[in-house]
Amino acid sequence: RRMLVLCAVGVAAGGRTVGPDNVRPEVSVPSAYRGAASGPPAAGAQSYGDLYWWSIFPDPDLQALVRTALAQNYDLRIAVTRILQAQSQVTIARSQETPTVDGSASAPYAGFTGSDRPITLPDNSFAPQAGLGVAWELDFWGRFRRNTEAAQAELLASEEARFVVMATLVAEVGKAYLTLRALDLTLEISRRTVTSRMQSLDLVRARLEGGVAGILDLRQAETLLYSATKTIPEIQRQIEQTENFINILLGQNPGPVKRGRPLEAQIAAPALPPGLP
């Protein structure tokens, strides 16, 4: 009778758990952006944030860089490892709610020869043994269930953290690659400018020899040429630093980065609806 009473009390108490239930707080969010165009959205309008990254970056070489970063980036590896740790914590917390069963077995064998054998034992002794134990702690106040809920919340937080790292990584690789292609275009323009300034300097020298231009015109042409020439090493330094940054994101040693499409053919942006901030 005492055991039945204790079990009834445990079942009744098990319906209540320690602490209040987790309730998502209510947040006041406006239904539309302030200043957005009134009226229904355009037919077929899709949010830019819902697009896949490979549809935003159509360059195959850039897509290869992003896939390499997703496979080798150390920050993303750490995030994945934390998810595995959180999954194991959920398993450990959930296991506390179930009974624990322990089993053991042994089969000792002893043999005696000559004068070593005790008088009360036979020549050979074989005594198999087995045991089974069951333990279960009743979760009267819901402590184990709260631990499981907490572990599951930590797992969800770890998964969201991985998504954040993944989205940030894709954005950083894409931004660095576009910066690299912009620097390539700037370097090309600078080299064209140097070629144009050299031709202009030759023309001024010819005019000076013909007595049409003065020495001041020659010095101005030389200054323009030197100003255009000194920008090339700085741009090359920026290109090298950007390549090193991309390789760091990829989890690789510094080195050159393969180029793909030109800058003006990189982004495949959809038609944005009017009024979008």
Image (spheres, rainbow, N blue to C red):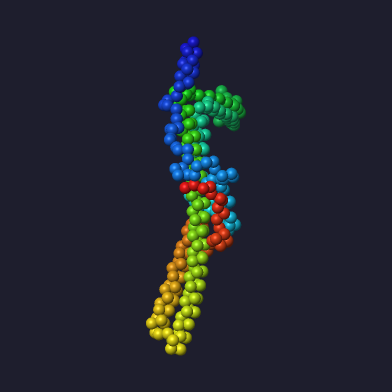
Quarter occupied by residue 211: bottom left
Q: Nearer the viewer, residue 73 or 100?
A: 73
Q: Residue furthest top?
A: 1
Residue beneath the point at 44% across and 76% down: 225
Q: How many marks?
A: 0
Q: Where is residue 217 drawn, in percent x and y?
A: 41, 81
- Which residue appears at 49% of the width and 60% of the height? 179
Residue 124 in the image, given as x and y percentages of width and height: 61, 28
Residue at the (59%, 45%) spot, across then down: 44
Which of 151/266 is in front? 266
Residue 25 visible? The answer is: yes
Residue occupying the far left of the picture: 216
Is any atom of residue 117 visible in this view? no
Q: Is residue 75 above or below residue 179?
A: above
Q: Position of residue 83 (x, y in %)?
A: 50, 41
Give the residue at the far front of this rendering. 39
86 and 204: which one is in front? 204
Q: In terms of depth relative to the viewer, which is nearer, 70 or 72?
A: 70
Q: What is the x, y in percent for residue 63?
A: 57, 55
